[in-house]
Amino acid sequence: MQKKKTKSLDWEIKVQPVYTEGERLLRGYQSIIKGEESNTVLSVMKNSYNPRTNKEFIDIVNELTVVAKTNAPEFSEYDSGRKVLAYLSNPRKKSIGGHQISDQILIGNSFDGSTSLFVATVINYKGSNFTYMNKKAAFRVSHRTKELEHLFDYVEMMNDYEEEKEMLYNRFEEMSDSKISKDVVDDFIKAVIQYKTHDDEGEPVEISTRTQNKIDTMKESIQKKFNELGENVWALFNGVTDYTTYHYTGSKKQNVDGNMYGTQNTYNQRALNYCLDLLA
C-alpha cells in the first residue's frame, strides 16, 4: 500500500554484491537495498542496471518545482520503496463543462526495473483521478546508462508538457460537448473490462459472478456521471475513473493517487482510448 505523502524522501539506496547460500559471489548481479540500516531488498538486478538514486530523483523534482512554479513537492513510496513518486500540485485550476478540474505533475522512479525515471500528469476531477502518461513532454531517464546528465532543459520540457496537457484538456472539452446514446454503454464496459461472452468456437460463455458485479458497479458509476454531467462522452469516461477510484476491489488494487498502477490504470487507459475514438 502507498504510504501517506510526506514533504521529504529521507532515505537512500545502497548497492551490494549478491552471494549464494554457500557464500559464493554471484557474478554479474547486484542487490539494491533500501537505506543504510535496512535489510529490505528492493530488487536483485544485473550489473548492467544502474539505479537512479533518490538524490538524483529529488534534484530533478526540485528543478521542475522551480521551473513549473508549482507548490512544494510531496513525496510518496509504493511497494516498500520499490517505486518512489513526487507530486507537484498545480495552483492554476481549469474547468471542463463548467466544472473545476485540477492536475498534478507526477515524477516517478523505480528500483525494480519496472519503469524508467519519468514525468506524467495526474488529473483530478470531482474526487476521481487518473494518470496520463505524457508522450511528447515526458522524459525517460534510463537505468542502462552509468552517467546521469543533470543539465536537462527543464524550461523546454515544461513548455512541451503544458502544450500537450492543453491539447488533452481540449479533447476533454470535446468529450463534454459530444452527446451519446446509452446504447454504447454495454460495448464500452466490455471494451474496458475485456470479458468474454463467447469462447473461441463461438459458443456462449457464462459470465462469472465476480465479473458481473464489476459490470453492474461500473454501470452504476457511469449512470451517476450521466446524472451529474449529462449523457456525453466526458461523463462516460468519468464513470470509469469513478469506478477505479472508489469501487474497484480487485486483488491487485493499487492505492496510489492517480491510479497509475495495475488494473485500475489499465481500465482508465482503455476507457480514455475508447472515448477518444468516439470523437474521431
Image (spheres, rainbow, N blue to C red):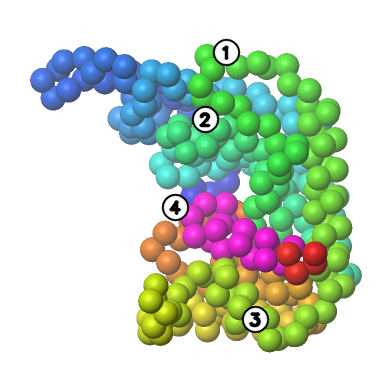
- Name the kind of residue labelled 4 in the image: Met
Residue at 74%, 26% (x, y): give it.
Answer: 63
What's the magenta bit mostly, secondary-structure-wise? helix
Residues at marks 1 and 2, CA–CA distance in whole angstroms: 23 Å
Image location (x, y in percent) of residue 39? 30, 30
Nearest the eye: 63 or 231:
231
Point out the stretch of residues depicted in magenta.
Answer: 259-276
Hey, which quadrant is residue 190 in on the image? bottom right
Q: Nearer the viewer, mark 4 or mark 1?
A: 1
- Name the kind of residue labelled 2 in the image: Asp
Q: Nearer the viewer, mark 4 or mark 3?
A: 3
Which tag, 4 or 2, sits closer to the chain's start? 4
Q: Which residue is mark 1?
A: 147
Left or right: 184, with 36 as reference point: right
Residue 1 numbered tag: 4
Q: Nearer the viewer, mark 1 or mark 2?
A: 1
